[in-house]
Amino acid sequence: NPKTIKLISGATDDDLKILIAKQFIIPFESGVVVIKDWKIHNYIQKDRYNQTQYLDEKKQLLVEENGAYTKCIQDVSSLDTQVRLGKSKDRLGKSNNTMSDKSDDVIPYSEIIYYLNEKAGRSFKTTEAHKRFIKARWNEDYKLDDFKKVVDNKVADWTGKTINGQPAEKYLQPSTLF
């Protein structure tokens, strides 16, 4: 639990953000945090090892040759076969359902929410509702840089201002921005 460790050690939120930015720790949407070099610097005897309860997060990790953890972005074992150019029944320019579906695996939900939180000083989680807003824009061909640009522009526009008598900063949220 990073919050408990943060309190015990006297660390701040900024310290945690620095560890994430420098990739010393790997955060998950569920709140689980993995220390990237844990297996390099620590050894647990087999008779003392207990299986983690966070199996979904563990499935997303790979162990590199040097023992460092890496977050697997996409499971290549379950990829669909690709349609070769010139062999598709549909001509280029026509819709091909297997090719036009945009996969959730390539949408950087966590990175977008993290960027918003960092710039707006907020603490949003990557929820299903937030993912729907982001996915809708992603499917309209907006990419990571576009999301960052929206966040930057609205933080600059709304910080310290009011809208209908309310602090404009309250509108710096995924449902409003995306």
Image: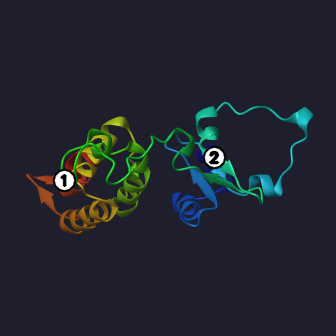
Q: Nearer the viewer, mark 1 or mark 2?
A: 1
- Residue designated by label 1: 93
- Residue designated by label 2: 61
Viewer-proximal residue among 84 and 132: 84
| Amino acid type at mark 1 | Gly
Residue 125 visible = no
Horizontal side of residue 177 vs 32, given as left or right? left
The quadrant of the image that shows the N terminus is top right
Horizontal side of residue 20 vs 89, given as left or right? right
What scheme was used to colour the molecule?
Answer: rainbow
Viewer-proximal residue among 40 and 123: 40
Alpha-carbon distance for marks 1 and 2?
Answer: 38 Å
* Image spot of residue 36 (x, y percent): 68, 56
Q: Quadrant of residue 52?
A: top right
| Mark number displayed over residue 57 | none
| Amino acid type at mark 2 | Leu
Horizontal side of residue 145 vs 67, given as left or right? left
Q: Which residue is the extreme one toward the front? A: 87
User: Which badge, 1 or 2, comes first in the chain's sequence?
Assistant: 2
**55, above or below 18, in the image:** above
**57, above or below 42, in the image:** above
Label 1: few (<14), some (14–19) or many (≥20) C-alpha neighbours in 10 Å: few
Residue 101 visible = yes
- Helix, strand or loop for disc 1: loop
Q: Residue at x 79, y 32 (%)?
A: 50
Q: Residue at x 63, y 33 (%)?
A: 55
Q: Quadrant of residue 70?
A: bottom right
- Helix, strand or loop for disc 2: strand
* Image spot of residue 80 (x, y percent): 45, 40
